[in-house]
Image (cartoon, grey):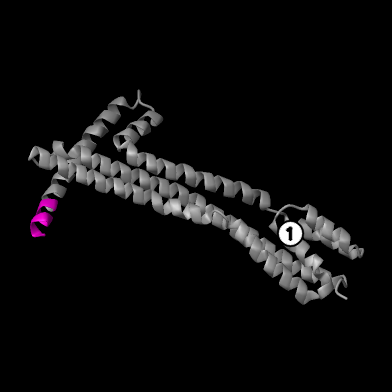
């Protein structure tokens, strides 16, 4: 065990020397070729150098994660409703005693808030308690629909850096294999494996950060819709009581 730790320590120092030398060479090359190499070509170059087998897995995690994020964002934007305007239209109908017209207004309006208000209006014969109970129950159903797909996004956020770290471990193993085959611990022997390890980790972390930004935006959007839905539910009970809908 001590021999392994000693070997790993020597390897790590040599790896750092090799990585430093490699970064210096890459920096010089990048500065010289900055005018001729575009960002996409540079990204493609590092993608290939990072071992396409593991980099492809990270790319798949990014594509699938973005697909779920885009689907949620589009769905939530469609589900967003101007609850103040909706509640005002419902109150106009209830002021004239047109309960069926109020139901039609809620039914014809897209979004979870309108669906919850429709359930409340439909339960009006049972009194305020029945209205509140039906809106709470149906609101839980709508919350589940709003959060659909979030576990998959969270999965890809966790999976992307794990795949990157897996590529890092594989790169370290490859570097050890090269040391064993060459019988030498020079930086040129381990530089390739270390570069693969660093690139896969970087790409995995970048993918996780991108998906995390979208995830937080989606969660904040769901919270906003939920708050508006709850406010509209409370407002509906007040409106129905004010216009003597409960018998």
Task: Please say if 245 is above or below 117.
Answer: below
The residue stretch that appears in magenta: 1-8
Instruction: Please state the horizontal and vertical placement of residue 9, each as a whole percent of the image.
Output: 13, 52
Magenta segment's dominant SS is helix
165 relative position to 174: left or right: right
Instruction: Tell which residue pokes out farthest to the right in this image.
Output: 96
Tag 1: Cα neighbours inside 10 Å, few (<14), some, or many (≥20)?
many
Examine the image and state in which quarter residue 184 appears. Answer: top left
Q: Is residue 17 visible?
A: no
Determine the image quadrant of residue 246. bottom right
Image-based side of 64 in relation to 185, left or right: right
Instruction: Looking at the picture, tell me which residue is in the foreground, 242 or 131.
Output: 131
User: What residue is pinned by disc 1?
Assistant: 115
Residue 2 among magenta residues: yes
| Residue at the spot 73% in from the left edge and 52% down from the top edge | 110
Was residue 133 drawn as part of the magenta stretch in this picture? Answer: no
Residue drawn 63% across and 51% down? Answer: 76
From this viewpoint, is residue 31 visible?
Answer: yes
Query: Dot 1 lies on which element?
Result: helix
Task: Give x and y (percent) for residue 51.
Answer: 30, 37
- How far from the left and from the top, in percent, is residue 135? 72, 68
The correct choice, above or below, for 168 with respect to 96 in the image is above
Rendered-image quadrant of the C terminus? bottom right
């Amino acid at each position: 065990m001590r021999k392994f730790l000693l070997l790993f320590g020597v390897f790590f120092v040599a790896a750092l020397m090799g990585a430093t030398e490699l970064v210096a060479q890459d920096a010089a090359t990048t500065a010289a070729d900055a005018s001729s190499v575009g960002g996409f070509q540079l990204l493609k170059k590092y993608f290939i150098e990072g071992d396409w087998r593991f980099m492809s897995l990270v790319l798949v995690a990014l594509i699938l994660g973005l697909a779920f994020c885009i689907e949620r964002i589009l769905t939530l934007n469609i589900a967003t409703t101007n609850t103040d305007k909706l509640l005002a239209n419902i109150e106009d109908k209830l002021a004239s005693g047109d309960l069926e017209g109020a139901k039609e207004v809620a039914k014809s309006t897209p979004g979870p808030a309108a669906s919850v208000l429709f359930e409340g209006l439909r339960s009006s014969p049972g009194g305020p308690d029945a209205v509140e109970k039906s809106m709470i129950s149906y609101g839980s159903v709508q919350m589940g629909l709003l959060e659909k797909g979030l576990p998959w996004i969270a999965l890809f956020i966790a999976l992307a850096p794990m795949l990157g770290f897996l590529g890092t471990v594989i790169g370290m193993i490859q570097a050890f294999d090269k040391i064993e085959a060459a019988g030498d611990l020079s930086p040129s022997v381990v530089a390739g494996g270390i570069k693969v390890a660093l690139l896969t980790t970087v790409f995995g972390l970048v993918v996780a950060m991108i998906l995390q930004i979208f995830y937080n935006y989606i969660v904040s959007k769901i919270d906003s819709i939920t708050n508006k839905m709850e406010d509209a539910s409370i407002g509906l009970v007040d409106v129905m009581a004010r216009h003597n809908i409960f018998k």
